[in-house]
Image (cartoon, grey):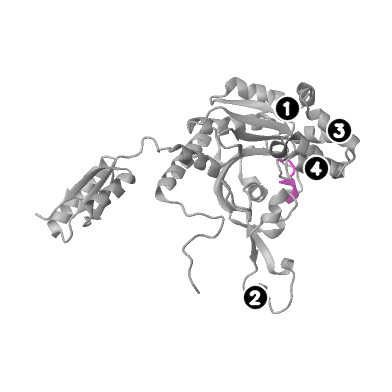
């Protein structure tokens, strides 16, 4: 069997230069969310398969990396169904694990509880620009707050992070699942057809109004489709659509106190694919990416599926991998990084001379510098060029006395 040195398709190795950016961004995220009162938690990468297949993850439930039973529980000696040999899977997001976590620990947590969670998630998706099969998510959630102060806090915290990472002129698109349902009902669609309608509507930014009309007409009668799409035209009364919803308060409050350079925009075509959203939903759109770089919404019914008791909940996930990709494409450099010094040491240095080198390195590290000690190579120019590319601004050579 030949060993393979490349990672599995859809997954990636991370080189030191990118890792430095990732660690810096993680630091900005954590320090900012800490200012807003969020507490860090961690959940396992592996979840019970029945939780992952609970009809709340939308299309992501088709993308689960499933895990076989182990040991005596796994019997492959006879033909079996998948259900008989699988008992768990890798999490496809951080929201479902958070709901299970809160249901299990609610008595030990404050109310409301403001959670910060970062970690890898896995989806057997088609890899493309900014999309991997293993990727990092970074979520903040507020559990136990039925008011829309929670949405305001989440949007302000997330946009503050993006502002501190030097992102400008982005848009927070916002809608409400109840508005979506109301528009579908007004056009005469049956409630059982809502999700089919929304899946097609969600393609609006990719295929346009004409494409959405064509797909809807392939399933539904023309009178309902026309009545529905008329609500999204240029003459649509957006104020009337938002009337009675919390969206005006959320938009107006965020616009009044925001610190980053962005705009809030009501978008009645915004759907978000997760089946667990129950109220306001939102996404971050950036022109330089051409798509969403984060999103979230209210999911008041998910925790109740574990406990039998409804618990209000709302969350916002920043598109960590896409943010990193955009920063790297800009040539982003970590600000205020430690000065890096390289010591090149001649081979076979006497013990006393080598001790002096390490003592000098100790002194420089105590002064706040990064010091790397390496054996001097024959091709010193190439070695120095490599060190320079790694950010070592000073290179010192040490020879035998």
Residue ID at (18%, 59%): 347
Foreground mark, 3 or 2, reads: 3
Q: Is residue 305 magenta?
A: yes
Q: Is residue 398 magenta?
A: no
Q: Position of residue 143 (x, y in %)?
A: 66, 39
For this orientation, the residue located farthest to the top is 256
What is the total number of numbered labels drawn onto the structure image? 4
Q: Which residues are magenta?
A: 299-306
Q: Quadrant of the C terminus?
A: bottom left
CA gap between label 2 and label 4 equals 49 Å
Foreground mark, 2 or 4, reads: 4
Q: Mark 1 packing: few (<14 Cα in 10 Å), some, or many (20+)?
A: some
Mark 1 or mark 3: name the one nearer the start of the chain: 3
CA gap between label 4 and label 3 equals 12 Å
Mark 4 or mark 1: name the one nearer the start of the chain: 4
Q: Position of residue 151 (x, y in %)?
A: 65, 32
- Label number found at residue 246: 1
Which residue is under mark 3? 226
Q: Secondary structure at mark 2?
A: helix
Which residue is under mark 4? 215
Whether residues under marks 3 and 2 lie with C-beta atoms below 8 angstroms apart, the answer is no
Whether residue 316 is visible: no
Mark 3 or mark 2: name the one nearer the start of the chain: 2
Q: Mark 2 packing: few (<14 Cα in 10 Å), some, or many (20+)?
A: few
- Label number found at residue 72: 2
CA gap between label 1 and label 2 equals 53 Å
Q: Secondary structure at mark 4?
A: helix
Q: Is residue 105 above or below residue 29?
A: below
């Amino acid at each position: 069997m030949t060993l393979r040195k490349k990672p599995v398709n859809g997954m990636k190795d991370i080189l030191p230069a990118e890792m430095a950016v990732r660690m810096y961004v993680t630091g900005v995220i954590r320090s900012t969310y800490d200012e807003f009162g969020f507490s860090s938690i961690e959940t396992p990468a592996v979840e019970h398969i029945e939780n992952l297949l609970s009809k709340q993850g939308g299309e992501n439930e088709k993308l689960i990396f499933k895990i076989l039973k182990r040991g005596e529980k796994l019997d492959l000696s006879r033909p079996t169904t998948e259900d008989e040999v699988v008992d768990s899977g890798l999490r496809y997001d951080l929201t479902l694990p958070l709901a299970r976590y809160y249901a299990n620990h609610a008595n030990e947590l404050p109310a409301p509880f403001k959670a910060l969670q970062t970690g890898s998630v896995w989806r057997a998706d088609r890899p493309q620009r900014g999309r991997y099969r293993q990727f990092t998510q970074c979520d903040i959630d507020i559990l136990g707050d039925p008011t829309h102060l929670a949405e305001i806090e989440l949007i302000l915290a997330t946009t503050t992070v993006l502002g501190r990472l030097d992102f400008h002129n982005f848009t927070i698109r916002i809608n409400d699942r109840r508005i979506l349902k109301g528009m579908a009902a007004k056009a005469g669609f049956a409630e059982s057809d809502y999700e089919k309608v929304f899946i097609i509507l969600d393609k609006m930014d990719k295929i346009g109004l004409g494409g959405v009309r064509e797909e809807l007409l392939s399933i539904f009668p023309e009178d309902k489709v026309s009545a529905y799409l008329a609500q999204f035209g240029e003459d649509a009364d957006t104020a009337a659509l938002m009337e009675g919803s919390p969206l005006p308060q959320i938009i107006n409050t965020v616009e009044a106190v925001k610190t980053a350079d962005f705009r809030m925009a009501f978008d009645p075509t915004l759907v978000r694919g997760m089946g667990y959203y129950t109220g306001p939903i939102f996404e971050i759109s950036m022109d330089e990416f051409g798509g969403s770089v984060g999103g979230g919404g209210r999911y008041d019914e998910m925790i109740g599926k574990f406990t039998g008791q409804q618990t209000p909940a709302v969350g916002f996930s920043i598109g960590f991998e896409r943010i990193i990709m955009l920063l790297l494409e800009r040539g982003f450099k970590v600000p205020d990084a430690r000065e890096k010094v390289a010591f090149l040491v001649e081979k076979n240095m006497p013990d006393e001379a080598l001790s002096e080198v390490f003592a000098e390195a100790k002194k420089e590290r105590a002064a706040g510098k990064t010091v790397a000690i390496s054996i001097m190579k024959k091709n010193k120019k190439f070695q120095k060029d490599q060190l320079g590319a790694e950010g070592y601004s000073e290179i010192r050579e040490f020879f035998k006395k």
